[in-house]
Image (tube, helix red, strand yellow):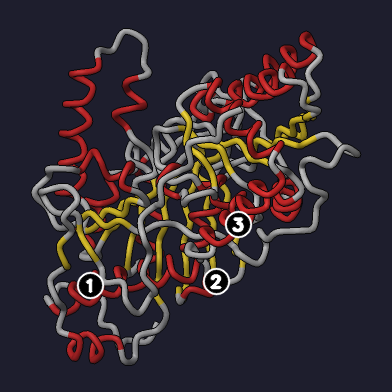
Amino acid sequence: MTPPRQGAAGPALLSPGEQPLRAVSARWGRPRLLPAVNRAGLAACSQDRPGLRLAQLANFLSPTSGGLRVVVEEIGAQRWGTGERLLVVPGPATLCRTDGACRICSVAGPRLPGDGHDYHVLLRRRPVAARLRAFAPDLVEVHDQTTLVWAARWARRARVPSVLFSHERLDLVLGEVPGVPGGPTERVARRWSRRMTERFDAIVCHSDFAAEPFAGVECETVHRIPLGVDLKLFTPRSWPPSCDARRPARLVFVGRLQREKAPHTALDVLEGLLSTGIAVELLMIGSGPLGTGLRERARRSGLPVTFLGHLADRSAVAQALALSDVALSPGPRETFGLGALEAMACGTPVLVSDTGASRELLAPHAGAAVGGTPEAVRTVHHWLTDQTEHRRARRAARSRAEQFSWERTLTSIGRLREELIGSQALRGVSHRRFGRKR
């Protein structure tokens, strides 16, 4: 087997004290600093202000959600400086509950047809707007580009800033619709992206890949802020080397069993490795509409695959990643690649697609971006048969993941929030005085 093509080093990350807020310029790849805010005036506005009243709106969240749920929870958690928080999500029925300083409201919405998850969507504006009015937020953050973009207009009328977190590439989603030509789809997506920059005060993308639809848009509102990983939960553990004859090598796939995550690729790689004579097994963690077909394929072909379904216990996921030899994250349109990053944090080298944002996370020897099954099989075979290379890959994966802490991510998001709320206050258009007691 020839040595694999290693992933190129991803973007260097500065420490929180070094990294300025940057906005994507009209010429892609040349970020410009945000206009400076009067810090003295901002401090005066914020001196007696209680904690941030943050409203978050999100679609496509369910009890079996993965990365999106983690992101919404992490950036809205009270420990990051939010005083009170409202989270509005869709569900089968309307129900509100309070969890500490967080008010969680599930608003009844239709279930997405043909989906293996219990995904619902927020279509009715009135109940969502009513909860926003009652909460009176300082900032509205929207985690959806479809049925919730109207919230930017609501925020503007309420004289509070709004932020869109761009978690999907609508151009690629539309491109998968049967019978829809690519050219018009791309033009529609570009126009939609331009409209988003006009409606929202800021747009946050977590990778260069996620920000591509906004390239060429004359705006200063698009910000690239990478996500983070819990480095204490996702951490390496002792495990016999992959070439240990006493056990088969273990591959692991963590993600929804849906087409966009390409779970069939994991079975393709497993079959290719077995054909080389390597003793190897595959652990599949996740649920979704493709689950039945994947189980049937594994049974029919006699493949050593263990399907665990969705694991709500994040520590169990971390343990599975740390006790595996190679993680497979082949989704071709990931807008960040949180699953790949969590595997790297566990010291497990990761195989990703050569399209999508996951490849931006890689560093030399920490993983590899591949373009097809034959290359994937060669790469994993090299890791599993060369103990020295595998140990180096484990060390490199953990070292790269340590550059992506949640503390660093929230420092950048907190600075953006400060800029937005401070600018709003200094313009004298805020609907609430910062020093006023609630």
Q: Secondary structure at mark 1?
A: loop
Identified at 79% across, 40% down, the residue is 243
| Mark 3 residue crowding within 10 angstroms, few (<14) / some (14–19) / many (20+) | many
Quadrant for residue 93, please give it: top right
Q: Nearer the viewer, mark 3 or mark 2?
A: 3
Residue at image coords 48%, 50%: 364
**Which quarter of the image is occupied by the C terminus?**
bottom left
Q: Nearer the viewer, mark 2 or mark 1?
A: 2
Q: CA distance from mark 2 to mark 1?
A: 22 Å
Residues packed near mark 1 inside 10 Å, few (<14), some (14 to 19) or many (20 plus) = some
Q: Residue at x 76, y 48 (%)?
A: 323
Which mark is on residue 101? 2
Earlier in the chain: of badge 1 and badge 3, it is 3
Local packing at callout 2 (Cα closer than 10 Å; few below 14, some 14-19, many 20+) is: some
Q: Secondary structure at mark 2?
A: loop
Residue 137 locus on image (x, y percent):
35, 67
Q: Amino acid at mark 2?
A: Ala
Mark 2 or 1 closer to N-term? Answer: 2
Q: Quadrant of residue 303?
A: top right
Q: Which residue is mark 1?
A: 431
Find the distance from the CA under tag 3 to the CA under tag 2.
30 Å
Q: Amino acid at mark 1?
A: His
Q: Amino acid at mark 3?
A: Ala
Mark 3 sits on what residue? 345
Q: Would you place residue 284 above or below residue 153 in this image? A: above
